[in-house]
Amino acid sequence: MEMTINSDDSPLASTLSWALRRMKEAGYPIKSNVTIVVDPGLRFMGYAEKHGDTHYIVVADWALDSEMLGGLVLHELAHIYYTEHDSPTHRSDITGEILQEAIERDGLTEKETSSLTDAFNHLQNILVDDVVFASMTTKEVKLAERFFSEWVSEHPTGDSVVDASLMARNAFAIASLKRRGLADGLEDMLAKNARFLSFFGEDARREFDEIEAFLEGATAGWSVDEFRKALSTYLGIILFLMKSQRGLRDLR
């Protein structure tokens, strides 16, 4: 897919300069070379990747007019920050090894592998967003609260793999607000999640609480060994949910 590199005086480059300044002011300076590019074929908002000595933030063209663009760039810069500091959560040799072990051990399908990867991304993102929230103004935090409130699913699908992903996403959204003591929208999010869990047996609440508590308490201060153990435990919960053949009580 052809990408467009923005010139130094483009609005997108200005957004990058703004975000780099915010990160530095919050105590999280980026030392690497960072370039921001547009991918017109990208279906999600954006991501970061490294080639040589340069980090690239790739943004979808449809996201350029989004009110969340600044938050996206901050988020991707926070990923770069953790990569610069060699955090275990952003070391592909460690994370790739643990994920691959689970994939091979449990014989996961492509769909199950995608669900497990999404769950891992929630762990990375909740840590990354600690940096993002520290770099935000009060107004921007309110916008982020509204963003997370839209993530909570109320109705399961009956597909154990999809529903495991939905439960993990609900947990991530709720933990994101609870982790930072944010209350706006939380009551409605909890009510939607309670509705989601009500379609399953009594164990669903315990399983959700395990995921939510894990994400809420995750720390960037884990040693390599601590991170390996934490990630393996967390992924084990997600795998159990994906493999559970439980029926829904009533989808009405």
Image (spheres, rainbow, N blue to C red):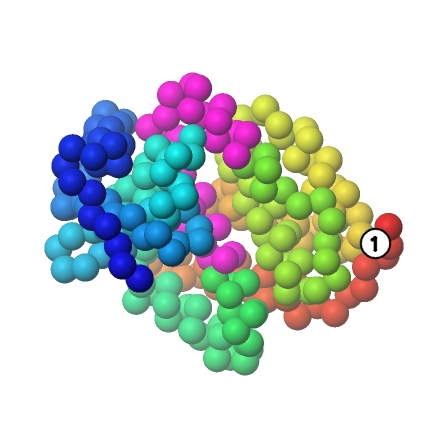
The picture quadrant where one finds residue 148 is top right
Q: Is residue 117 left or right of residue 224?
A: right
- The answer, for residue 44, to whether it is visible in the render is yes
Q: Amino acid at mark 1?
A: Leu
Residue at position x 23%, y 50% in the image: 4
- In the image, 174 versus 115, the foreground residue is 115
Q: Which residue is mark 1?
A: 251
Q: Is residue 204 left or right of residue 239?
A: right
The picture quadrant where one finds residue 10 is top left
In the picture shown, does residue 68 fall above or below 60? above
Provide the secondary structure element on which disc 1 rests: loop
Residue 144 lies within the magenta run = yes
Residue at position x 41%, y 43% in the image: 62
**Which residue lies most toward the top here?**
138
Q: Main secondary structure of the magenta part?
A: helix
In the picture shown, does residue 40 fall above or below 30? below
- In the image, 69 versus 145, the foreground residue is 69
Residue 25 x %, y %: 23, 25
In the picture shown, does residue 159 fall above or below 21? below
Residue at position x 16%, y 40% in the image: 7
Residue 92 x %, y %: 31, 63
Residue 120 lies within the magenta run = yes
Residue range highlighted in magenta:
118-147
- In the image, 76 versus 87, the foreground residue is 76
